[in-house]
Amino acid sequence: MKRGTSTCQKFAINPALRKTLFAAAFYLVTGLGATLPATAAVSITSSTFANNSTADSVTGATGIARSWHTANTFSAGALNINNQFQYQNALAVDQPGGPNAALTSPRHASFDLVFTILDPLNQGYNLTVDTRLRGYLTVRSDNGISGTASSGSFSGRIDLDTNDANDTLGDQLNGLTLFGASESSTDSANTLLNQIKSFNAGALFGTRTVGLRFTTFGSPNNVFIQNNGDGEMASRFGLDPVNSTANGAAAFSNAFYLGPDGEAPALHGHFVDVRVTPFATAVPEPSTYLLLGAGLGLLGLRVRSKCA
């Protein structure tokens, strides 16, 4: 050390820089740590369900009954949506000698789900849609003439941004489409149908409104019996058929639809599970900023003490 050079001079720093260190420490400790978000900003909001199916109906005539019904259970959380759409289509025929012509009852199931994903910080997220179709196809022929029950196939469509000019809700997407099945018998049959698919929309960024559409238009749900047939046909996906009050209408044997495994209706229907998974962010926790502020403050005090 040169003669005449003090310890304070050796460690001296620009007074303006020292003031900046103290100001930064004060700002970080008292303000910034309290204002930074501690959790991800991505969330689901404004979720809606719309049933566009054929209207519920119960009709009957002498020895003939038709029943069609739908129901829905919808719930939404901060990052997920769960939807259970239930339906049934049934035909019962009980006429001595049977009708003169074949009897059929085609119906359409269709519904929309629309929801907004908030991403104000452009953090990014992954969107996954899981679908499942589970229920019974039941046929009972009372006179050896073939009857058929069909679930219909649910085509799935998605529009990843309903506010842009590109409307894709008219385009069927294989990853969201559940192909149904038919059951035919001249005796009796009760078949459990179970279809599952998972669709990943990939990485998305920013706030957007997403639309989902599921419909059997193009492949209707149908129950059918050949000429002069007597019996009962039904596609049952969580609901039982309802008897008609028309004079002389045939009655349904609801208990028959439970099937050999006796599954509860709550396990049946068309299920949609939407999941939004936010990407991890590099934003430090508030405690990190508090430690940094404390460090800057200590550095300023050290420099000051050296100059004392």
Image: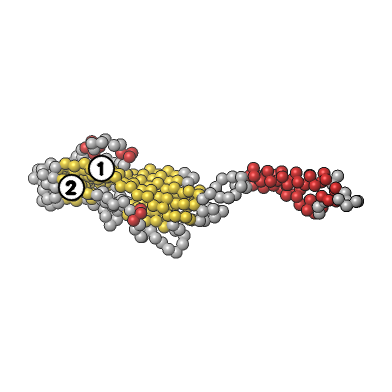
**Nearer to the camera, 82 or 48:** 82
Q: Residue at position x 26%, y 55% from top?
A: 219
Q: Residue furthest left?
A: 97
Q: Is residue 297 left or right of residue 238?
A: right
Give how far across and how far down residue 128 sits, in percent.
Answer: 42, 50
Disc 2 target residue: 184
Earlier residue among tags 2 and 1: 2
Q: Secondary structure at mark 1?
A: strand
Q: Is residue 67 in view?
A: no
Instruction: State the separation of the CA atoms marked 2 and 1.
Output: 13 Å
Give how far across and how far down residue 28 sits, in percent.
Answer: 69, 47
Q: Residue furthest right?
A: 4
Q: Residue at position x 27%, y 40% from top?
A: 240
Q: Is residue 31 left or right of residue 253?
A: right
Q: Which amino acid type corresponds to the residue marked 2 in the rendered image?
A: Ser
Dot label at residue 192:
1
